[in-house]
Image (cartoon, grey):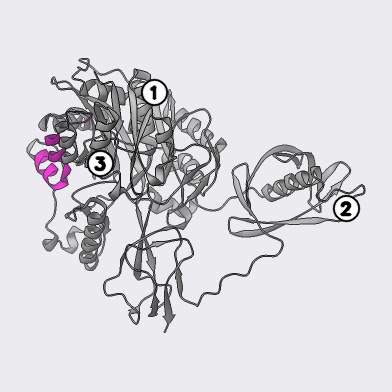
Amino acid sequence: MISSLLVANRGEIACRVFRTCHELGIRTVAVYSDADANALHARVADTAVRLPGTSPADTYLRGELIVQAAVAAGADAVHPGYGFLSENADFARAVLDAGLVWVGPSPEAIEAMASKTRAKELMAAAGVPLLAPLDPDAVTGKDLPVLVKASAGGGGRGMRVVRELADLASALRAASAEAESAFGDGTVFVEPYVEHARHVEVQIVADGHGTVWALGTRDCSLQRRHQKVIEEAPAPGLGAEAEQRLLSAATAAARTIAYTGAGTVEFLVSKDGDSVDRVHFLEMNTRLQVEHPVTEAVFGTDLVALQLRVAEGGTLDGDPPAPSGHAIEARLYAEDPSQDWAPQTGTLHRLSVPGVRLDTGYGDGDTIGVHYDAMLAKAVAHAPTRAEAIRRLAGALERATVHGPVTNRDLLVRSLRHEEFTAARMNTAFYEHHLADLTKAAPDPYAPLAAALADAHGRSRFGGGWRNLPSQPQSRRYLVAGEEHEVHYRHTRQGPAADDVHDVHVVQTGPDLVVLEIAGVRRKFAVSRYGDRVHVNDTTLTALPRFPAPEPDHAPGSLLAPMPGTVVRLAEGLSAGTPVRTGEPLIWLEAMKMEHKITAPTTGTLSALHVTPGQQVEPGTLLAVVTPN
């Protein structure tokens, strides 16, 4: 029996595993980097061990340090979570060699699926349908589009869609460089890219006594940069025959490699000319998935508890539990979808999503840094039907309190309510087709007035601007969705009042709540302030100073860092004097496990280059200057 368990991970998944351990009476051990010294997972664990350093390469990817931490803390088992070393066979062996229990499949099973090219060979031999890899040197225009994909790792890293033959060579180089940086293995391969396909996966749980459960399907088609955003179980709209093919193929995959524990077999599902579902094996993830809660909700089970049971040598019942209802999960990211998904950093002042399951690695007041993934939390809703689950999750996210950096919350709500999603007609190109509409700014037009009245109330309480007689009109300026708004109000004996606003009556004001009657309808506005940032319901404003500071003077053609991050590489041969073309990628930044291209703003000459690979930069840092022709 496991009595003390170390989670070789951080954030949300570490907290998730700890929750089950605490319910089972298992003591918990966390590991944390210097950047995570006060992180939630380190706070909630019974014991925590420091991994000196901040980057993943120095901390969470150092298997020998994690094994030493487990031994030092008296743990008798290690759970890898997902990401980092979760699919590293050498790490699994090191854990076992140290006399500890490994909560996962055997190192041999991990190795069998670690290389996507080797996995495809095994699956083909087992009769699992798949997309055959292509010889990169033999790809012709008839093969396009194709997908360049890293053989190791996952999470969308090292993947490129190629639609023009002339772009294949550069895509191979870029994908290989990204894979080498992310996984230490630059091996890539090419396969056909299936347009308008759905991403469907099967949850597997297997014990060491020959029992394999296939716990239904999940649809994970809504993705950005090949990374999942919204997932659900079961996958909607699948015919009974296609579903059975998926379950059978996943079971065959698990048996082929003598799999034990929890894992996921991923597929592409496409329609042929006769609208028949075609199933293509993608890969097997030999670990728990981020989206595992939707399966837990539908099957009424705890997958982490099952992992621990199997790791202890226990058995599964002959038949899995029966499914019930529908579950949907949305990943809340600190990112700006309207700005090429740029990750955001800063203080998460408040996070609350009422009425649904919320898995998170953050608490109120925690700092979102640049070193790790941008996911803040996962919100999961379960209901008897898919339509009810959608409504419940969208409503919960709409009422959520998310105060801090920009997030994708509005995108999630709009995605859940989009007609293609509600009708289950989505595919992996959903955001390519609809992102512009889904990210249109739609701030509440009365939010600036509510913010100004709440601020005026606070000032009047503390003597700032109060008069015995009605005062002269006063004003406040706010930046909302990139536009400046000026609001006028005045102090009266009855309190602050709107000035020159048609058909609006102030019912109540307070520092945290304003009630307005707008065209006969009363509306409540919750107001929260953090420095110059103001949150009014789900609209975020920036209070502008009366006398704005002058903008820094940058030469035309200056390239500024849009986010904090690390310069991972430069365009080949890039140096001062290099001719460049508009839109040509020049610099790649990595922030929160994502790469972002900085492109030439105009055609001309690179007249200055101020950064080198490996350099850390802050938002607004001058990276380079392009002088127009």
**1 vs 2, front mark:** 2
Label 2 crowd (10 A; few <14 / some 14-19 / many >=20)? some
What residue is shown at x 69% (from left), y 39% (from top)? Answer: 512
Which residue does the numbered mark 3 point to in the structure image? 65
Magenta-colored span: 103-124
Q: CA distance from mark 2 to mark 3?
A: 66 Å
SS of the residue under disc 2: loop
What amino acid type is highlighted by mark number 1?
Answer: Gly
Disc 3 residue type (three-letter):
Leu
Label 3's element?
helix
Q: Quadrant of residue 590?
A: bottom left
The residue that disc 2 covers is 471
How many numbered discs, if any? Answer: 3
Q: Is residue 4 above or below residue 68?
A: above
Answer with mark 2 or mark 3, whichever residue precedes in sequence: 3
Q: Please tell me in which quadrant of the rendered image residue 517 appears.
A: top right
Q: Residue furthest right?
A: 469
